[in-house]
Image: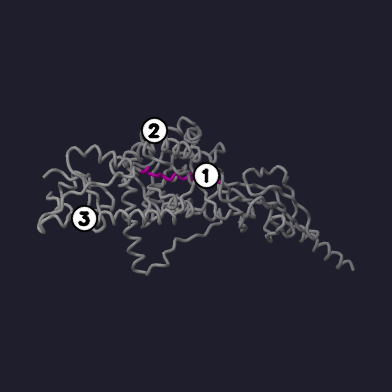
Amino acid sequence: MALSVVAIISAGLWTSLQAATVEGMRLWAAPDHARLVFDLSGATSADVFSLDNPARLVIDLENSQLEADPDSLSLEDSAISALRTGTREGNGLRVVLELNRDVEPRHFTLAPNDQYGHRLVVDLEYPGESAVENPIDPIEAMIRDQEMEAQRASAETQVGDSQQASLPADEPRAAEEAKPHPKRDIIIAVDAGHGGEDPGAIGPSGTREKDVVLDISQRLADTINAAEGFKAVLIRDGDYYLGLRQRTQLAREQKADFFVSIHADAFNSPRPQGSSVYALSQRGATSETAQWLADSENRSDLIGGVDGNLSLRDKDQVLRGVLLDLTMTATLNDSLSIGGQVLDQLGRVNRLHKSRVEQAGFMVLKSPDIPSLLIETGFISNPDEERRLRDPVHQQQVAEAVFSGLKSHFERYPPPASLLAWQRDNQRRPSGDEYRIQSGDTLSAIAVRHGVPVNQLKQANDLNGDVIRVGQVLRIPSS
């Protein structure tokens, strides 16, 4: 009898020891989703399901109890209009979220890390919404571009046929009058690293990387938008988490010409200091420090519970390899060129940790079609640089330095349809004719057609190689 009582008491103690306590609740509201995080004293399992009329999301945590105050949770700008809690089946916790919009829920648990203990994460994703303001529908944009290109090609074919008919067979075609430029803005995607559940590195005084890089990113976006011919797209404009692949996908949907990710460095010693600029390396990092940084940044996807993969499954194996090789090579070359300009400008406002553009395997840089850089603005683990990273004046100086480097590159090599390209071409117009590149053109064929040497044509248009783009306007120097 005594043995049975002991066994019952022991079983009760074991059950009590295994019970998880909800020690805190945190909510981050993003334009396209909300993330609710339960901080737990131990591991637990959860059941999440939806109810209709009215719309609710029910979260049942097994063998758990609530110590956090749910009334202290701000529900502003989220899909949750109210939150209720109660006991379920004696030893469980039920949390009911009253919803004010359609959501697609998903949930997962996270093991303890350096910053947090056990967690249950519940994501409420909003169907059809984008994480950036005024998103561009990529399908609609593609269809619109194809229609415009087809109309242009048709018009040029008709003009070309009529002109060709009036010329002797052996007479070269004259320089065609260039169509008006669209004068579009150059779009810069500005990505503030980390966010929400992922604070990034934390300085000696408690400064969180996610906060200072958001401040710098917002200042950079304002600086970009104040410049004629440029437009900024903020990938993250609040304190919420986005997956690394989602960040580059958003940039692609916004048809960004360039992607820049803003971070603050950290090390296990307070001595390192200075800014760094990174571009993607297909073969991995170029130094141990770069490798360590790449690994730590990439692990933030685990913090956010994201597991995405870039897929080209609709292409055969050979074509996938060729496409990725060509696009990666082109974008990497552009990234390194722009990175050198940015590094030079950063060196004027802050000490440089490395005097050259480093290369590492950062996941956030692995967009094959968009040139991109990751900028470590300073070491938040260094007390002096932590203080400077919090200083609004220094933040603005960093933002202006980054944009100055970007602007220097794009003023020299503007995208073909941009306002900057039109301004450059317009300035050159008095000294020669123009030709807008069409599908099938090559640099050598254009040179022969207009009776000028290829090298002279390259020099007149600041071309370093033979790569040209459909729609690009070339200045034809006088022979």
Q: Which of the two discs, 3 and 2, sits closer to the camera?
A: 3
Asked whether residue 171 is drawn in magenta, I would say no
Q: Percent x, y for residue 392?
A: 49, 31
The span from disc 1 to disc 2 (Cα, nearest Å) is 22 Å
Looking at the rendering, the stretch of residues picked out in magenta corresponds to: 184-195
Residue type, mark 2 in image: Val
Split into 4 quadrants, where in the image is the N terminus?
bottom right
Between disc 1 and disc 3, whose residue precedes?
Answer: 3
Residue that protrudes farthest toward the top in the picture: 393
- Indicate the quadrant where residue 400 lies: top left
* Mark 1, secondary structure of its residue: loop
The residue lying toward the viewer, choosing from 100 and 287, is 100
Q: Is residue 356 visible?
A: no
Q: Earlier in the sequence, mark 3 or mark 2?
A: 3
Residue on which disc 1 sits: 201
Left or right: where 96 falls relative to 375: right
Q: Can residue 464 be seen from the camera position used here?
A: yes
Of callouts 1 and 2, the N-terminal one: 1
Instruction: Name the element at disc 2.
Output: loop
Query: Disc 1 or disc 2, which is closer to the eye?
Result: 2
Pointer 1: residues within 10 angstroms few (<14), some, or many (20+)?
many
Q: Type of residue at label 3?
A: Gly
Q: Which residue is mark 3?
A: 160
Give the x, y percent position of residue 279.
37, 49
| Residue carrying label 2 | 349
